Image (tube, rainbow, N blue to C red):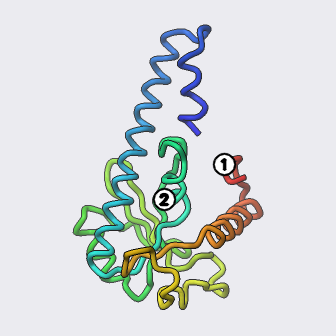
Amino acid sequence: MIYLLLNPLLAANNVPEEIKNRIRKVIVWDTLTSKVQMHAIDTLGELFEKNGIRHQMLKGAVLKKIYPQPEMRGMSDIDILIDPKQLSEIDYLLKKSGYISQGFIDHHDIYDKSPFLSLEMHRFLSEDKSMNFSRDYFDSEECKASGCEYTYEFSLENYYTYMITHMARHFYKRGCGVRGL
């Protein structure tokens, strides 16, 4: 949202240069963050595929690649669905790659890497573990990404359904922003 909202102000004639300089700094930081996140998404995908870790990128990690420019889709963390049976291997690989475990919250493990990368390693697709769609998910050949052995992805229809249900959960629990709509 920063890129979409602030970038047009740089072209406005009635915005003082001092304000434009502050806007430029925010846009540069946001762009840098986005580039680092995109690199991390690709690097983690390759690392997991190479090491036999069943995984699937979720939410913003997928959407950033759909937008005309990744900076147009900001995100605070990288969400990855993982096979809970591989937690120890995942923990080892992430720590070896410089990530620090911040512990387990609700239905995901959190890892951080300075200065601003944050991962949420989801054990379930939903906080409602009775609706554990991921239980048999990684045993399904039809969900594998093309040309991959351990990387999974939703069909467009399933991704849309997942995102709508995820947004609805946010809406009913604590609200959602316009981006979700």
Q: Which residue is mark 1?
A: 179
Q: Residue at coordinates 36% horizontally, 67% vertically from top-left? A: 45
Residue 43 falls left or right of residue 152 = left
Report the disc number at residue 61.
2
Q: In terms of sequence position, does the residue under pointer 2 or pointer 1 come before the other?
A: 2
Taking the view exactly as shown, the residue that stands out farthest to the front is 147
Side of 82 relative to 176 (left or right): left
Residue sticking out furthest to the right:
172
- Image quadrant of residue 175? bottom right
- The vertical placement of 59 against 76, above or below, is below
| Label 2, residues with CA under 10 Å away: few <14, some 14-19, many ≥20 | many
Can you give x and y, in whole percent of width and height, for residue 178 in the image? Answer: 71, 47
- Residue 135, placed above or below residue 61: below
Rendered location of residue 14, percent (x, y): 62, 8
Residue occupying the point 25% across, 61% down: 98
Q: Whole-Å distance between the Cαs marked 2 and 1?
A: 15 Å
Q: Residues within 10 Å of mark 1 (few under 14, many from 20)?
A: few
In this rendering, the answer to whether 154 lies above or below 137 is above
Q: Which mark is residue 148?
A: none
Give the residue type at disc 1. Answer: Arg
